Image (tube, grey):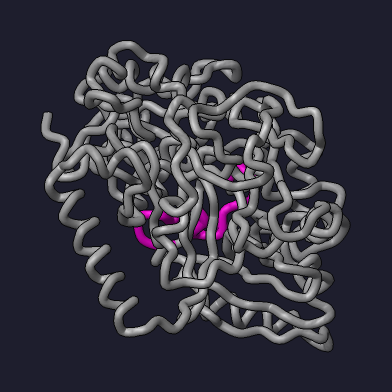
Amino acid sequence: MSCGKLCLHLVQAFHSHLRSRSVICVTGQDTSHFIQGLVTNDVSKAIQSIQRIPGGIGAYSSITDPKTGISSASSLLASFPLTSLEFAAVLNHRGRVVSDTMLHFTGEEECYIEVDKQMTSQMLKLLSLYKLRSKVQIQDVSKDIKVWVSTMKVIPKNEQFISNETSNTESSAITDVNGTNTKDPTHGHVAAVSLASAQLPIIPIAEALEPFHGFDVLCANMDPRSAHLGVRVLTKIKHRTESEQDQGLKDLKREEHVSESGNDEIYRTNLHVSETVYRGLRILHGVPEGTSGDSSDFAGNPLPLECNLDVLNGVSFDKGCYVGQELTARTHFTGVIRKRILPFVIGKSEQHALELAQYALTKIGKGTDHALMHIPEITANSAPGLSPGVFPRHFLEYDMSMKPKVNDSIFLLNDANKENAIGTISSSFYNMGLALFRLESIFASPESQVSIPLNLSDGRVCVAWKPRYLS
């Protein structure tokens, strides 16, 4: 099997410019109150999390997986302002999703709302509609503010590997990738390590920041949906001298050349990849996003709990009133959710698809590292000196003909009645995808974690599984 020009099973850490995302800035004294009445999550908690973190610049923040209880901490880089990030959705009056959002709060009076680029115009109209007499200013800042994701994790620098020693002083303690307090021998000097594997040597801070030279970093926070998605970064384009621009072009050409040549050295640090790779990582861990193109998980006004907002830190059930709250609360408290977005994989045969789905269920997303390094057959096939990457070696089929089509239907295996679709594809990446499934139709019992074999409309076989936050 050919890996193509970029062997994703070797990529241990990457950063990507999310060109499909745009940014709307809301400022003014009523900002937090205004947004609180429009989104599913509790904005007040985001504001409080900024205010109660001591130390200002360089202070620590953390998120905890709601299902596993695993805590992932990150130190904001020394040049980053103190900010907060929340995942939420904007609903219509019928309680259905208009758009998913990432809310980047830099304070009580400023918030950058990240949305799908195709939703920018509609979101601006909606925000203006609900503004009324609120003292806020709303503007599209997408030309100047860019969205990035980086799977580099920020932790205190250590010359060897991550230490499990405990610190005697609160100022030098931070939680490592396994939730253990670790000593900071450099008193807050920051470095980065790949989320893919806790066994990698610490990477100097200069390398972690290198992707963002030429930009002012506005905010950077761990993705609240899943620690496996890394750090979400907003940058502002700044003026660069002609020599700096020339150097930036040289760096970009070098990066492209190395990735094309297949030099393994590039995989040791932080590879610059297209947004497509980030989409693949998101699908692998079952996290929905977007309303257009190959990331259309929130298209068609689905219900928020069908999109797993309740298990991805995207909705609060005790915050009070917001647009569309009634149906969301009723669905939650009755406990009846008939459909959910789930990841699926296409196999070469029925048995192959079942094996891939079972592998994904038991290995992917286990712990805060990727856990693929514990699989002997994966480790044995890795390049010398390298731990496995963010994608399993034998999981992906690097064949575009295997790619599922967004909006295509999924049926029960060998079902001749093509009108009874039990799933609709919303995101795709090689032979993986996300789809909105009728749960009772695809699982043998409510306790089942892997679905029965299913058919795409063209006859190919796929199998879905429940990601870790649902298991």
Residue closer to the observer: 361 or 164:
164
Quarter the N terminus occupies: top left
* Picture quadrant of residue 458: top left
Residue 275 falls left or right of residue 212: left
- Give x and y (percent) for residue 48: 84, 57
Number of marks in the image?
0
Magenta segment main secondary structure: loop
In the rendered image, residue 294 lying in the magenta stretch gets the answer: yes
- Give x and y (percent) for residue 38: 74, 67
Residue closer to the observer: 292 or 412:
292
Q: Is residue 17 above or below residue 125?
A: above
**Residue stretch in magenta:** 292-308
Q: Is residue 69 visible?
A: no
Residue 209 falls left or right of residue 269: right
- Give x and y (percent) for residue 6: 20, 43
Residue closer to the observer: 454 or 322:
322
Q: Is residue 153 above or below residue 67?
A: below
Which residue is depicted at the point 29% across and 40% down?
Answer: 267
Q: Is residue 123 above or below residue 150?
A: below
Which residue is depicted at the point 26% across and 32% down?
Answer: 396
The residue most toward the top is 376
Which residue is depicted at the point 80% across and 63% down?
Answer: 322
Which residue is depicted at the point 70% across and 65% down?
Answer: 105
- Give x and y (percent) for residue 368: 56, 29
Quarter the C terminus occupies: top right
In the rendered image, residue 186 lying in the magenta stretch gets the answer: no
